[in-house]
Amino acid sequence: MAADRTAADRTAPGSTAPDRATADRTADPTASALRTEGLTVHYGAVRALDTVDLEVARGAVHAVLGANGAGKTTFLRAASGLHPPRGGRVLLFGEDVTGAPAEELVRRGLLHVPEGGGVLTELTVEENLRLGGLVRRGRAARNAALGEVYDLFEPLRERRTRQASSLSGGERQMLAIGRALMADPRVLLLDEPSLGLAPLITRRIMQLLQDLRARTGLTVVLVEQNARTALRASDRAHVLDQGAVAAEGASADLLGDPRVRAAYLGL
Amino acid sequence: MAPSTHRAPASDADPAAADSAPAATAPRPGRRAALRHPLVRHGLWAVAALAAVAALTAATGPVTDLRVANVGLHLLAVAGLQFLVGTSGQVSLGHGAFMFVGSYAMALLVVNVPAMPLAAGMAAACAAGCLAGLVVGAATARLHGPYLAGATLMLAVGLPAIALRFPDLLGGANGLAFATIGAPPFLAGAVDDTQWRAIVVWTVALIGLVVLATASAGRLGRHLRALRDDAAAASLSGVPVGRARVTAFVISAGAGSLAGACQAYVLGTATPSTYGLSLSLVLLAALVLGGLGSLWGAFWAALAIVYVEVAGTELAHALDLSTDVRNNLPVVFFGAVLITVVLAWPRGVHGALSALGRHRSTPLKTGDSR
Amino acid sequence: MEHFANLTLNGLATGAVYAALALSLVLIYQATRVLNFAQPAFALVSAYVAYAVTAATGSYWAGFAAALATGALLGAGTERFLVRPLRNASPLSPIIATLGLLMVLQGAVGMVWGNEPLSFAYPLDYRGRFSPADAFALVSVLLVAFGLFALYRFTPAGLRMRAAAIRPEAARLSGVRVGVVLASAWALASAIGALAGMLAAPPFLAPNAFDLIFVFAIAAAVAGGLENPFGAVAGGLAVGVLLSYVTGYAGPELTALAALAVLLTVLALKPDGLFSRAAARKV
């Protein structure tokens, strides 16, 4: 948490420099946004992920699909730094971040919205959002980010002083995504954002992700049980089965392949 | 409504019986059935142990006799604590308070009713302790974890202060002093006073242990272990949770106060400072060191308590350490033991207890509750 | 009536000490769900360090500062090396661990400085019905309480602390360095505990000196609701005043038992403490 300020600090008031500035300087411009090589994760004696190779291009929306217990959430938790992998590597814009804790990866622009949103119900809406923005430097940057999120999610602005526990499911998901956006993400991991939400709200969220991708070049990794929604919203997809990659490819292709549909997607 | 389907190992408290067939089977006719009964088994063990103690103290001098007596009474005290903490899962930091009750009950009786026989005094002290246990147990029955620990800590600090409140009756900070009964006249030649005291203490202690072991092996023990592992499930299975917990307190306090009475008997004094917070903490620490899962842990704990002090004194002499260092060595040692044990076995108390429960299972055990 | 007023004022002054120690217990419990039985030992060691520093430098306030620093260090160290490794263990383990630490620290203090009471200075003049020392105790604790409130409510650091305590994983996903934050919470809490020690130590400091105030602090913290700092402060002051009456009318020896009786009564009526909002988390 050193207070060293670089030039990038002043030129990019919204960013989470210096970590971001350093990362940008050393990053490989041709590298994919997120890549895992042979990622293996254990929970005690159980092998939850088995040598998963996965690559997500910059600015892509990438889906990770599979049945319950296939390892989708485990994959996100390993990628975001919540759970250290037993083997393999995680690369963020070409930089090896294997084993780095989640709180550090947030400063490098890797944000993970867990299943259910991970909203802190005892805090207010605004406190939740401000929490997400703490990695930004300077009050001006944080306030600007807060304004942007409120512009995106009007209902949150209306409820800013209410306790997060009083929000509906859809509003909580908005809050969770908003909180992640406060940290100026470059890669956003979303764990079942549509869970328990009405189709209308789900569509809005997917549309929002597309907009963000178009405007800011945000890379999105989407974990979903609802395969159809996810494949329609994404460019490419991986299908996990019992911790291993069972199928991968362009989303349109997967959606059109009857074997894949039947075997893994329940379609 | 019968409690859970799994059979509690009847040999939980008495490891020697682990290799014999479980006592909970249908009684077989004849003499062997009598031997299978937990009370008889424990009684035989007790008689053997008492004989060993008698032989040991006959061969050794007064200093060792005193230590043997100390081991005996601490064994009873810690066994009572084991019943409460290990078997019923109620972590109490107030066991020293119950020893205080017994010690002062004995001292008051000896001072005020000198002609009273020793056995009656012991019984009265035990009754006083049981009453105290009833009050405390009922008051704390709904408390768990840190709340129970906190409340019993308050008891450990607060109860001995009563002696200071009523200095005329209870002797104040200096406590009560009295002469204790030595060996009866007809044994005067064969058995000296210190040996006699050691034998008396061990007799009392072993009686207490037989009661504890039998209770632990019986239905109460099964109920307590069930509610220790999962109070909600036990309650649903028909275990009277509140009543069982209070009963555990009563029995534990009875054992503790009996141990306190023995201590008064051996030392000839009862002082409040002996029964402060440190004592309760050391008792618990020694129990954790000796093993929480069974009454055998109490034995190792008692040995540790007595001989850590001995070793500390000798170390202090050898290294020419000050009395301050020597006096505080046991507390520091046991505190370090607690920290080490907990860091080395992070699954901790319950984990070790459950693991013990599984390893001790008898062949007829049907289905594990875990 | 004058006697009653005296008792009340004295009760507030001593209650401030209980409030500070209770506050330190509650802060730690809020942050990590651990009732830190070693807290009075941190205060004890801190007070003895202050004694040594004051003896060496001749300055009371140097000792005071040293005490706060010692408390903070002990708190952070304990969180990092004793409590954090046990965060996934059974709920009994931190109790046993902090008890062990209590024993080690109290015993060590006895080894180094002996069991004989040492004469300990007051921060200010202690004479009078409500002396400057009494006022200092009350004012300092109230300032600390308000300072904490402001910290938690209005500062980013406070927000991080609340997040780390409520949902550590979600906090990590927001970039909060939960480990550092929790260690800081323990450090802050233990510094407040050290303040309580400095206020409680005079006129005489001995290894067992804080056993009794620990009893009262537990009563205040638990009765106020272990997760409510406001309850801890209010509880501490209330306990101080209550026990002042008990002492005034029935003698000082039974205060611990009185505190226990009050605590058990409160818990019987409100099992989660007087000021707690119904917490769904199981104790």
Image (cartoon, rainbow, N blue to C red):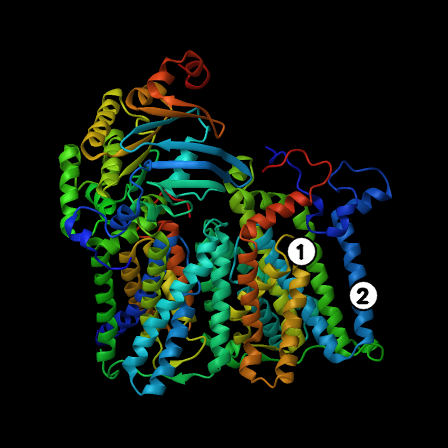
| Of residues A214 and C261, the one drawn nearer to the viewer in this rendering | A214
Q: Toward which corner of the image does residue C218 lie, by quadrant?
A: bottom left
Chain letter of mark 1 equals B
Q: Please rate how many residues cluster around mark 1, counting C-alpha atoms within 10 Å: few if below 14, some from 14 to 19, many from 20.
A: many
Whether residue A138 is visible here, answered yes or no, is: no
User: Mark 1 — residue?
Assistant: B295
| Of residues B126 and C143, the one drawn nearer to the viewer in this rendering | C143
Q: Toward which corner of the image does residue A168 lie, by quadrant?
A: top left
- Taking the view exactly as shown, the residue that stands out farthest to the top is A258
User: Residue B102: percent from the left, percent from the top?
Assistant: 59, 67
Does residue B38 sit above or below C180 in this rendering? above
User: Residue C85: percent from the left, percent from the top?
Assistant: 47, 55
Q: Which structural element holds mark 2?
A: helix
User: Residue A108: percent from the left, percent from the top?
Assistant: 30, 46
Identified at 25% across, 55% down, the residue is C158
Q: Which structural element holds mark 1?
A: loop
For marks 2 and 1, give the CA distance: 19 Å
Position of the N terminus of chain C by quadrant? bottom left
User: Mark 2 — residue?
Assistant: B52
Identified at 36% across, 86% down, the residue is C55
User: Residue A54: percent from the left, percent from the top?
Assistant: 41, 32
Q: In the image, B123: left or right of B162?
A: right
Q: Amino acid at mark 1?
A: Leu
Q: Are marks 2 and 1 on the same chain?
A: yes
Whether residue B330 is visible here, answered yes or no, is: yes
| Of residues A243 and A235, the one drawn nearer to the viewer in this rendering | A235
